[in-house]
Image (cartoon, rainbow, N blue to C red):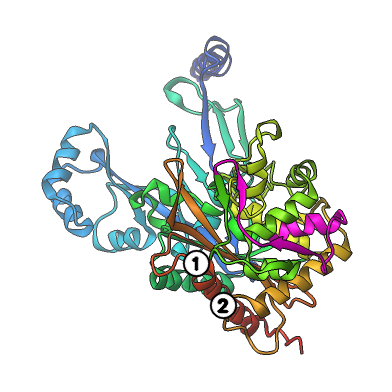
Amino acid sequence: MQARVKIVFYLFLIWLFIVLIRLFHFQVMSKTLNSANVFNKKLSADRGKIYSSNGSLLAVNEKIYTLYFDKSKTEDWDSYAQELSSLLELDPATVSARIKKYSVWVPIKNNLSLEQKLRLEQKIDTKPLYFEEGYSRFYPEASDSAHLTGFVGKNSKGENVGYFGVEGYYNDILTGLSGVFKSERGGGQLPLIFGLQEVIKPINGADLYLTVDKGIQSIVKKRTALANERYGAKLGCSIVAEVATLKIKALSCLPDYDPNDYQTASPSAFINPTVSNVYEPGSIFKPLVVAMALEEKKITPETVVDESGPVQFGQYFIRTWDNKYEGQISITRVLQRSSNVGMIRIQEKLGNDLFYEYLDRFGFLEKTGIDLQGEVSSVIKPKKNWYPIDYAVASFGQGIAVTPIQMITAFDAIINNGVLLKPYVVEKIMQGDKTKIIKPQQRGRVVSVETSQQIRKLLVEVVKGGEVKWDVPDGYLIGGKTGTAQIAVEGKYDPEKTLASFIGFFPADQPKFIVMTMLKEPSASIWGSETAAPLFFEIVKDLILYYNIASSY
């Protein structure tokens, strides 16, 4: 009996020794000889959401699934092919061919919704099926804020990447940081008992809260769409911003696209014309030049200038828009009549050096820094390349090309007590329990408070006594200026192709909002006073009702 016990004991020792040798081989030798035996799995972070200023969702993640078929779980492939084809509305022959092509794991369909997944699980035996979870970006408001949000697409590596708008500008912040699961594997790719098992959790992307008011955004888009149709414009853009902060409350350009279905849109639709395209601003530029001359004491609001006839530069003659002249006219009348000749006289008083210096002060020689992907700067020649006629035509907004966001930023400065601000569309960034509030940022002072007050009064008179009588809301002081810039075609201006615009603010006694409207090549009328201006006043009425803004008197 004792002999049997000893034999069993020795056999146990031998077995234990073999086990220890095998463990040593798997956990030490395999690690030493093959350090590549570390299994890494990427743990994706959730992309941050995008909200409007009132908390409405503008961009969110929706779960999607890729469906795989595991051939090792059944031999009845044809039956499954028929059932899957019927439930997923796929061609049975295509599904059968795919199952025959792959050895084990067969990809059947991408981008299944949760609803489709649940329906499959209810209708079919899911033992041979495998669902790989992913996400798709969803924009609840569809195209309403397309040029503000941008969209999420794929890069060359098949990774999700934000393009255009805030999706592109804040891509890194929205994406977050991926995590990783590390596991040392031995023979047969099994985890080692005493090997490395490490999990680095992903850090989800931050949520963005925009300055944009969803309600106003929807209203502005509808108004711009109606104006495009009414006036036969090729492009329409409208911007609404707070005067004191330059927060963008609404921005809409049409035509646009649906970011949920960006693959079907023309790539040109992705471009946001307010930040990525430049235009000759035309007469909406004139108040800036008047502000320059007022600030430098070259003129006063009571100054009169000569508008007795065209101004000649070599072989070229610069005329008023209607080729009519009133002789000695006031600064107010220059703006009311939108007199090109009068503006040349004001620019001459200011001088070329100061004029170009102010282009820089107003921010036209650089980008505004707005937090939207794709911003470009103006097209303005270096000072050494300017001729006298360049200064003359620039005084009424031709011969220089700026972005609409540069234009509204500069105009805001002359009505906002002379302070140049940085426009922005994101006011809050939230990540976990941390919140970053984006505050208004001053870029400098361009004119004095006194000059700003003078310009506001002049622009109120422009609206009151303009060449066209607009539907101005009763009881409200509104200041503004029209623009009608001829568009250059093959190096020559086409008088029938114009960029019609209007830029204005209200209530003028205490400016709260600044609004810019722009219509490219309207066919109903070439004049900004007859196209862009009515659109401006329609938006102003909507803002008054929406925010319940009290009348001025």
Residue picked out by circle 1: 527
Q: Position of residue 186 (x, y in %)?
A: 49, 21
Element marked by disc 1: loop
Decide which of 256, 528 is in the foreground and name it: 528
Which amino acid lies under the numbered mark 2 shown in the image of this protein? Val
Residue in the image at 80% along x and 55% along y: 293
Residue picked out by circle 2: 468
Q: Position of residue 59 (x, y in %)?
A: 53, 59
Which amino acid lies under the numbered mark 1 shown in the image of this protein? Trp
Decide which of 414, 98 is in the foreground and name it: 414
Mark 1 in CB contact with mark 2 (< 8 angstroms):
yes
375 over 531 or under it: above or below: above
Decide which of 107, 186 is in the foreground and name it: 107
CA separation in Å, label 1 and label 2: 10 Å
Q: Disc number at residue 237?
A: none
Residue in the image at 70% along x and 89% along y: 475
Q: Position of residue 469 (x, y in %)?
A: 58, 81
Residue found at the far top of this picture = 33
The earlier-in-sequence mark between 1 and 2 is 2
Q: What range of the chain is rendered magenta?
A: 286-315
Q: For residue 302: magenta?
A: yes
224 over 391 or under it: above or below: below
Residue 423 visible to the viewer: no
130 with respect to 467 (left or right): left
Quadrant of residue 17 within the rendered picture: top right
Residue 85 visible to the viewer: yes
